[in-house]
Amino acid sequence: GPEFSSKGDEDGVAAGFSEFWATTLLMIMIYVLNWELNFGKYHYWIKQTLTALGIRYLIETFPLAGPAINPMLGTTWYIFANGAFPDEIGHYFTYWVCPFAAAVFASCLYAVYAGGTVFGQKLPLGPVKGDAVSSSKKNK
């Protein structure tokens, strides 16, 4: 597969940055399409189409780690191509550390927006969504 290449990026910093932002935006897209928008009778079909288009956009916009946006897929490509687990730390940073950090970051952003908890802890900010509703009711 078109996995991460360590040439010129031995530590995986550039590829990891790319994977971090692709994963963050993917998670936000999933949260919005699944929890914030309702397309009525055709919700599933519209949501799936928009998700597929969004993923294609992210792959083109953040290409340094290949089109994985998935830790297991990125590692599987490596194992299939080389017959062994990766021995470069940059691979694990790019495909495992960055996506997990991005998922936590995106979850925190969504918790600030919509409320709720992250790892069972209420964040000191938010919910922004609830404040916007409260403010509009106060202004009436």
Image (spheres, rainbow, N blue to C red):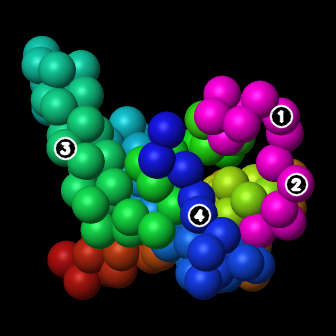
User: Going 16% across and 20% down the picture, which residue do you hit?
Assistant: 45
- Amino acid type of the residue tagged 4 in the rendering: Ser
- Residue 105 spot, x, y in % from top left: 65, 69
Q: Earlier in the sequence, mark 3 or mark 2?
A: 3
- Residue denoted by label 1: 84
Q: Considering the numbered disc 4 on the image, is that residue within a helix, a strand or a loop?
A: loop
Q: How many badges with numbers are in the image?
A: 4
Q: In this view, does 85 lie to the left or right of 6?
A: right
Q: Give the range drawn in magenta.
A: 78-90
Disc assigned to residue 87: 2
User: Going 17% across and 31% down the picture, which residue do you hit?
Assistant: 49
Whether pointer 1 and pointer 2 mark residues with C-beta atoms closer than 8 Å, the reply is: yes
Disc assigned to residue 5: 4
Circle 1 Cα neighbour tier, 10 Å, few/some/many (<14 / 14–19 / ≥20): few
Q: Earlier in the sequence, mark 4 or mark 1?
A: 4
Q: Considering the numbered disc 1 on the image, is that residue within a helix, a strand or a loop?
A: loop
Task: Measure how far apart labels 4 and 3 are at the Cα level.
Answer: 26 Å
Disc assigned to residue 53: 3
Q: Considering the numbered disc 3 on the image, is that residue within a helix, a strand or a loop?
A: helix
Task: Measure how far apart labels 2 and 4 are at the Cα level.
Answer: 12 Å
Residue 57 appears in the figure:
yes
- Amino acid type of the residue tagged 1 in the rendering: Ala
